[in-house]
Amino acid sequence: MSIKQNVQQINKNIQEINANAQLVAVTKYVGEEEMRELLEAGMCHFGENRVAALREKQSLLEDVSDSIQWHFIGNLQTRAVKDVINQIDYLHSLDRLKLAKEIQKRANHTIQCFLQVNVSGEESKSGIHPAQIDEIIEQMAAFDKIHINGLMTMAPIDATDSELQEYFAELKSLQENIAAKKIPHAPCTELSMGMSRDYLIALEEGATYVRIGSALYQ
Ligand SMILES: *Cc1c(COP(=O)(O)O)cnc(C)c1O
């Protein structure tokens, strides 16, 4: 199918399950041509996971930069913050206080951040342990460049459907607990969860941002 048909199909699924959710087109596998096709198909949220690739694509698409919201979705090294933080609208991978400190130092606008949470407890996954979320949010209170928009998670690649459901429901429950506290710098109303393989389950469990790559280019 064409990129346009894939966008239409995925948006149709989103409409049916949770019409408030945003599709973030993950563009790490593709180049300028596909990204222009995505724009023509009506996409405006683009996600990249590498600093150099993001910067390169931004320069290739400079003529249409007004139409694009950039999401950084990958692991961000502290020393790379200065190269990327003022080029993005959303950061999905805020996973430690040290990173927040560096963002506070380098950002010249408020960054919409998702706290990345390791709900599965997988050793290899980055992300904050659920028990540490409250403390880390408190520690970020003084950082006016950081707005905690919501929580993000990545499910293990070998998770079964019922495990996926459990992880996504767990993230939602954590999100609702924080939102209920009405913390000014952490309204935490959003949930970034679901990729090509598992976005339908994530939408069922309340995802408001799904990050989809490969399913767009099949
Ligand atoms: C690559 C990537 C995605 C998209 O993965 P697909 O399986 O291709 O949809 C989503 N989120 C993150 C953090 C990624 O790195």
Image (cartoon, rainbow, N blue to C red):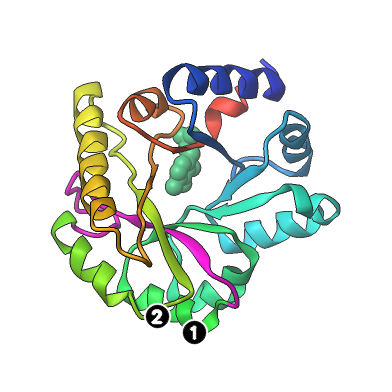
Q: Compared with residue 139, is residue 87 higher up or lower down, i.e. above or below?
A: above
Circle 1 residues within 10 Å: few <14, some 14–19, many ≥20 = few
Q: Nearer the viewer, residue 3 or 150?
A: 150
Separation of marks 1 and 2 at Cα, in angstroms: 6 Å
Q: Amino acid at mark 2?
A: Lys
Left or right: where 162 falls relative to 19: left
Residue at horizontal 20 percent and vertical 40 percent from the top:
170
Residue at horizontal 52 percent and vertical 65 percent from the top:
111
Which percent across, then down, holds residue 141? 33, 75
Residue at horizontal 48 percent and vertical 74 percent from the top:
145
Mark 1: which secondary structure? Answer: helix
51 is within the stretch colored magenta: no
For the N terminus, which image quadrant? top right
Q: Which mark is residue 72?
A: none
* Residue at the disc numbered 1: 105
Q: Compared with residue 1, is residue 214 higher up or lower down, i.e. above or below?
A: below
Left or right: where 46 falls relative to 90: right
* Residue at the disc numbered 2: 101
Q: What is the chief secondary structure element of the magenta stretch?
A: loop
State the extent of the magenta-drawn residues as a range: 108-129
Do residues under tags 1 and 2 come within 8 Å of each other at their CB atoms? yes
Left or right: where 123 falls relative to 89: left
109 is within the stretch colored magenta: yes
Which percent across, then down, holds residue 108? 60, 78
Q: Nearer the viewer, residue 50 or 173?
A: 173
